[in-house]
Amino acid sequence: MPSFDIVSKVDPQTLENAVNTAKKELQTRYDLRDTKGGIELDKKANTIQLSSENSMRVKALEDILLGRVVKQGLDGTCLDFSAEEQPSGNLVKKTIKVRAGIDKEASRKIMKLIKDSKIKVDAQTQDEQIRVSSKKIDELQQVIALLRQKSAEVGQPLQFVNMK
């Protein structure tokens, strides 16, 4: 029986390249040249730490980082900017989480979209991925097209792997 997996993962090397190019841009921008702090990637915790003297500059760092992530070919929704800024001494710090895996809420949304489409497929949640199977490959391709079209409703970047 044909099947495929829906996953949400970020290539760590591409993310590291995006952070490094954002650091280089930070050094060359005139308005941010003498800024204390910067951008740091924590690979183990899967977070990015932004720090600067004030919240306006932290917002500028967010814009630089998001621009570089998109230019590297990653989906901008893989970064979670919802965390609050934390004052730390004379710096303002903000921790950005990198989303990895499909969380339960997004999984429910995906399952609901598939069920509401009335395409004859079987979808099962397995940890941080969803396995979709059907008797016909055409139905699987319809599900992929549907999810690409409705990706904004899910709120996470999706990849379709292991098509068998």
Image: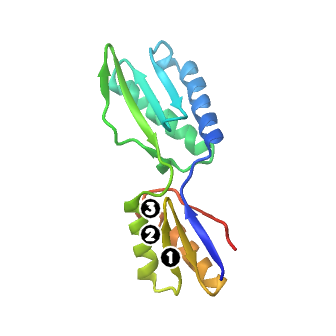
Judged from this view, the residue extending furthest toward the front is: 127
Q: Position of residue 118 (x, y in %)?
A: 46, 86
Whole-angstrom CA distance, mark 3 to mark 1, is 20 Å
Q: In this view, does 152 lie above or below 15?
A: below
Q: Residue at x 43, y 80 (%)?
A: 115
**Looking at the rendered structure, which numbered label has been put on residue 123?**
1
Contact? badges 3 and 1 (CB < 8 Å): no
Q: In this view, does 118 lie above or below 103?
A: below
Q: Which residue is drawn at 57% across and 32% down?
A: 19
Residue situated in front as seen by the camera: 6 or 56 = 6
Q: Which residue is drawn at 61% across and 41% down?
A: 12
| Crowd rating for badge 2 (residues with CA inside 10 Å; few <14, some 14–19, many 20+) | many
Q: Nearer the viewer, mark 2 or mark 3?
A: 2
Contact? badges 2 and 1 (CB < 8 Å): yes
Q: Mark 2 points at which residue?
A: 110
| Crowd rating for badge 3 (residues with CA inside 10 Å; few <14, some 14–19, many 20+) | few
Instruction: Tell me the kind of residue under disc 2.
Output: Ile
